[in-house]
Image (spheres, rainbow, N blue to C red):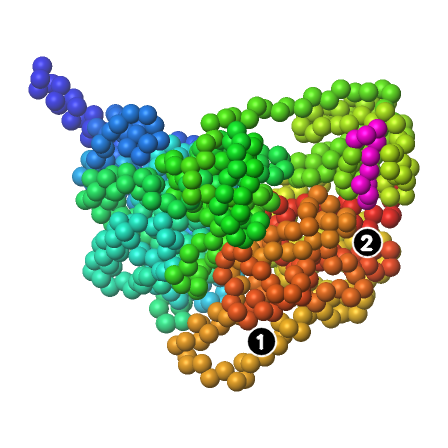
Amino acid sequence: MIKYTVLLLTFFTLTITAQLQSPSEFLGYAIGTEFSRHSDVVSYFEHVAENSNMVRYQQYGKTYERRPLTYAIVTSEANMANIDAIRRDNLKNIGLENGSANPEIAIVWLSFNVHGNEASSTEASMTTLYQLITEKQEWLKNTVVIIDPCINPDGRDRYANWYNQVKATPYNKLQVAAEHDEPWPGGRPNHYLFDLNRDWVWATQVETSERLKIYNRWMPHVHVDFHEQGINEPYYFAPAAEPYHEIVSDWQREFQEMVGKNHARYFDKEGWLFFTRERFDLLYPSYGDTYPMFMGAIGMTYEQAGHGRAGLGVNTDEGYELTLVDRVAHHTTTALSTVEISSENAGNLNREFKKFFQNGNLKYKSYVLKGQQDNIDALTQLLKKHEIKYGFSSGGTVSGYSYTRNANGSMDAAGALVVSTNQPKGKMVKALFEPNAKLSEPLTYDITAWSIPHAYGLEAIASTANVSANRELPLYNIYNQPSASTPGYITSWNSLYDAEFLAELLQNDIRVRFTEKDVSYDGTSFKKGSLIITRSDNRKNSDFDRLVNELATKHNRQLFASPTSYSDNGYDFGSPEIKLINKQRIAVLMGNGTSSLSYGAIWHFFEQQLHYPITSINTENFSARVLSGFDVLILPSGWYGEVINESAMDDLKSWIRSGGKVIAFSNALRTFADKEGFLLSWNEKNQDNNEDSDKNLTPYDQRNRQRVSNFITGSIYRVTLDPTHPMAFGYNKNYYSLKMGGNSYSFLKNGYNVGYIQGTPVSVSGFSGDNAKAGLENSLVFGEARMGRGSIIYLVDDVMFRSFWENGKLFLVNSIFFVNNNKFRI
């Protein structure tokens, strides 16, 4: 009987093994000789999970284009039988679950293909999976490997489908071939053209927010983000370059060295070139290496030569052919090497991981925030995505660093939001809320400022004391009752939530007014920008009361049913200062000449936040005839020299003079600088600071360092606002703006300087070179220039950048619906 059982088990095991196919066997082509469609990758992972007890494959969400987001859990059969206990023991070890544990199993997370056209890594995810369970089972005895085969399925399929359509057969390796020249916008971003590798913290995209749910369930010890770079670079792996954020531990630095040396051993054996400790730093918290690092893991980026130019094979400038087969082999090697070194150090990884979550040595113990409740609510939604704990203070005075004063100050903390570093994720709290990140090196790969209090427009104190926050504020769900006797309803204008309410009112053909003056009715006061929805304007709508009140309740907006249209202070409902809001027809330029990232942020904002329709127009179809059907034209940041030529500029001016409105973002302002009629000119101070290049005798190897003085790498500046201008309704006198560069424009001499830097610029966070900062003296930030009946809105700083600067988005809404609202279209 025993012999029979053994024979049966042996037969069963051999049968399962025989059924399991390699990626090449399953797909019908050798890996690296074709780009696999995402659906085929999903099918292969499903096949492996069905035929191996070492793999579980699950879906964690869907992309905007409805492709599945998936991950595989890979480990030994013994571990798989106990997988949930392993996961929970890891969380207990760092205090994220109750109980105690001393785990010895390493958890490694491999994230492939965050940028869609860096497409070799998804191919490598399949070879990595197969080799782990067929050749490297020993490592899996003390290691759980999580594989996300494709973080960005929409971008990958955009690239792979395009490449498969245009490539020659056999492929053409010449760089000038069409298959090495991706069209706009390329496969790098996701559906909404966001860079998902900058979205880990802000979680604006569905791919990120869904992935974080799984990430927080596992909290891996090691996380690798697989990328590609230019075709002439070989391969980059850890250790990372400086600057490192100060919360990066000695162990995290040490283990990167161990990983790098292990990779180097394999690369040297094969004769493959690589580089380390250059370019890719660990400062900005929203990357696929830094976010895990600030969550205690060993976060690393691996960069293979290739990118969207490489195709199946391309000649490099160094005279060799770079093939997809080679790229896949390199990524597979580093993936396996990472698992190997993690397995060898599983015990240390667990012990050091636990130490990271001990936060007693952090300077600031509490971040205390007050402001518009809508902004507080928006912030708490972000904290929930990261499972960061928060509470609300019952009162008392809190002292510490004041974000408003940029110096020590105090605050009445009654009802304030409190986010403490005295919690397991305290170091991530520090990274997100700290006033100013320390820089060991100003040459960084990304922005150097992102402070959440400024991004959400909140007054804040960073306190060295533990501020009590035991109280939960009650939910304040608003329920509005229709009033058949009221001449109109009034609601305040303070936040993007108010803008969403306005957008849905307009979509339901409810006519809405806004006030350009502070008003008062029956003893109740409202500030400029408040919405007034009158019965008179909507008398043809028999469902007026019910619809307005239902929509207000849906958006949690408090309506004031005024008993009279006669004001307390002289501005009655029929006042010329209380203007009808046009149901604006909005066009947005996209395509060649525009920044895909800037366009994508605008597109995403209208569809996923404001929920208001736009028409995207390709720059190739831009003309005066097209504009005749629109009220507003939005120009994303871009380079419009070939799009808006002299003839198109004349047509654009005619459209503006007839009442059209142009809203220009960031680099799009260059199109109008020093052009007749647009009132926009470069700041002479800025030009003076950049006219010394002919005198530059800086040595070659110091040139990059010298240029730093002309850079602003994502710094936060104090901006003075004119809150009486409709563009700034809902804001206070001071605003903190994320400035991405040194572009500097003079004050508008005959226009409206709505936001500006007057005198010496004040940077409260982030790096600014001396010359660049000086060049911002007396410069425009937000403004309006009139032309005939129309306007041009200038947004020097991109308030839509990566969609995370929540406090800036109302400027765009105000510009669309409030600014120069003298023409109402019936």
Any part of residue 154 in sight: no
Residue 217 % position (x, y): 38, 32
Q: Residues within 10 Å of mark 2 (few under 14, many from 20)?
A: many
Q: Secondary structure at mark 2?
A: loop
The numbered mark at residue 27 is: none
Furthest-top residue in this view: 1
Residue 680 % position (x, y): 74, 66
Quadrant where the C terminus sits is top right
The numbered mark at residue 660 is: 2
Closer to us: 190 or 26? 190
Closer to the chain start, of discs 2 and 1, is: 2
Residue 273 % position (x, y): 29, 64
The amino acid beneath tag 1 is Asn
Q: Residue at x 36, y 36 (%)?
A: 424
520 is within the stretch colored magenta: yes
Q: Is residue 560 left or right of residue 737?
A: right
Closer to us: 256 or 617? 256
The amino acid beneath tag 2 is Gly
Any part of residue 347 in sight: yes
Q: Which residue is mark 1?
A: 690
Up the image or down, 179 lies above or below 62; here it is: below
Residue 16 % position (x, y): 25, 30
Q: Residue at x 55, y 59 (%)?
A: 763
Which mark's residue is nearer the viewer, 2 or 1? 1
Q: Residues within 10 Å of mark 1 (few under 14, many from 20)?
A: few
Q: Is residue 249 left or right of residue 727?
A: left
Closer to us: 33 or 289? 289
In the image, the segment drawn in magenta is 515-524
142 is within the stretch colored magenta: no
